[in-house]
Image: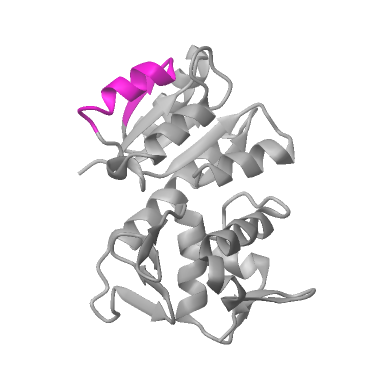
Amino acid sequence: MKKKIFIIDDERDILDIIKINLTSEGYDVRIFTSAETALNQLNSDIPDLIILDIMMPGMDGYEFCKKIRALDQFKHVPIIFLSAKTEEFDKVLGLELGGDDYISKPFSVKELKSRVKAVLRRTSAAASPDTATSNIIKYKGVEINTDNYTLKIDGTPVELTKTEFGILEIFLKHPGKIFTRDNIIDSIRGHDVYVVDRTIDVHIMNLRKKLGPYKNIIRTLSGVGYGFNE
């Protein structure tokens, strides 16, 4: 079955270019000139990937991302931000809101196709059942469920972004190991994803806040990286 991709951008030329190139790769591509029309379509259609512009009239890409990330059925649909906003702050914000990748305009079609393949490949791998491992990982009052991407702290559910969950999962699965920032990015995003300085630091900071009384289970080794502090 063809992977379905939604492209949301108010620039018709960009929509046409992306659609032609991704359709030639065998994807089922749907295009939208506004976030509002795409949001309406989501009521009856769930894509495998969303390519999302940030600066659009009406609802912008950030707001669209926040809205769908708040809904369980769309929480794990991957999003690639596509924008002329190139400041580090904008890229970090996009990832923090739940984006899986960020590509700056103007972009290379070859690079875009590579990023799309990488994100879909990781998503498919994450969705594949692994009968060799338990879906529940516990440590003291921290419990994660790798089937539904949930975290409980002393029995109370705590919301995590997909990236935060991925970081916590690799730490809990590899106690005692220290991961560099590049190790973490490779483990949860893949080797060919745009890397922004301090992105991992921001995710770690937010994750520690959400862990509350167990924030110290994340260890920092100065000048090296992060890991699980048993």
Q: Residue furthest right?
A: 223
Q: In percent of the image, x 68 and y 29: which residue is there?
A: 85
Q: In percent of the image, x 24 and y 41: which residue is there?
A: 2
Can residue 38 be seen at all in this image of the molecule?
A: yes
Q: Nearer the viewer, residue 93 or 197?
A: 93
Residue range corresponding to the magenta coloring? 29-45
Percent of width and height locating residue 93: 62, 40
**Looking at the picture, does residue 139 appear above or below residue 86?**
below
Percent of width and height locating residue 121: 39, 55
Its colouring scheme is one colour
Percent of width and height locating residue 168: 50, 68
Q: In percent of the image, x 50 and y 56: which residue is there?
A: 163
Q: How many marks?
A: 0
Q: Magenta span has 171?
A: no
Question: In what quadrant of the picture does the C terminus appear?
Answer: bottom right
Can residue 48 be seen at all in this image of the molecule?
A: no
**Image-quadrant location for residue 103:** top right
Percent of width and height locating residue 71: 33, 39
